[in-house]
Amino acid sequence: MTGDNRNDLSDRIAKAQADRAAKEAKQAHREAEMSGSVSAGGLALRYGAEFGASVAVGILFGLMIDYFFGTKPWGLLVMLGFGLAAGILNVIRAYRQLTADAQLQGTDQTDGPENGKQG
């Protein structure tokens, strides 16, 4: 009797391990599919954070310059301009990096309404 129980237990363990391996393989496949694609919301958050952080740092530096050197509006205005320029450059750099990554993965970014092509 104990031999039958052991075989039954071994069968159930083997089935559980096979089910677990299948679930892990399915999860790995799902993660591999998701890693290559970035949602529009994710892009908007990244670009917004890049731009907003640059402008905020420019404003803070401008306020510090105004406080320590007594150049009331000019430090803020100049550093705000630098912050805006840095924010624009950061967004351009992030877009180029995203486009380069897409080209490495083999996805074609040339079709679409933004490039005058309907696809």
Image: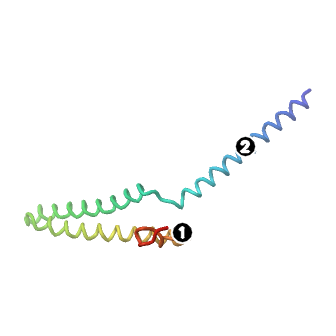
Name the amino acid, label 1. Answer: Thr
Q: Residue furthest top?
A: 1
Tell me the residue at 28%/69% (across/down): 86
In the figure, is residue 64 to the left or right of 35? left
Tell me the residue at 50%/68% (across/down): 102
Q: Are marks 2 and 1 in contact (CB under 8 Å)?
A: no
Q: Look at mark 2 in the image and give the residue it sits on.
A: 19
Q: Residue furthest front?
A: 118
In the figure, is residue 15 to the left or right of 30? right
In x, y percent, where is residue 69? 10, 66
User: Does 75 appear above or below 24?
Assistant: below
Q: Secondary structure at mark 1?
A: loop
In the figure, is residue 111 to the left or right of 52? right
Q: Which mark is residue 107?
A: 1
In x, y percent, where is residue 112? 45, 68
Q: CA distance from mark 2 to mark 1?
A: 33 Å
Tell me the residue at 30%/63% (across/down): 51
Q: Which mark is residue 6?
A: none
Name the amino acid, label 2. Answer: Asp
Going from N to C along the chain, the mark reached first, 2 or 1, is 2
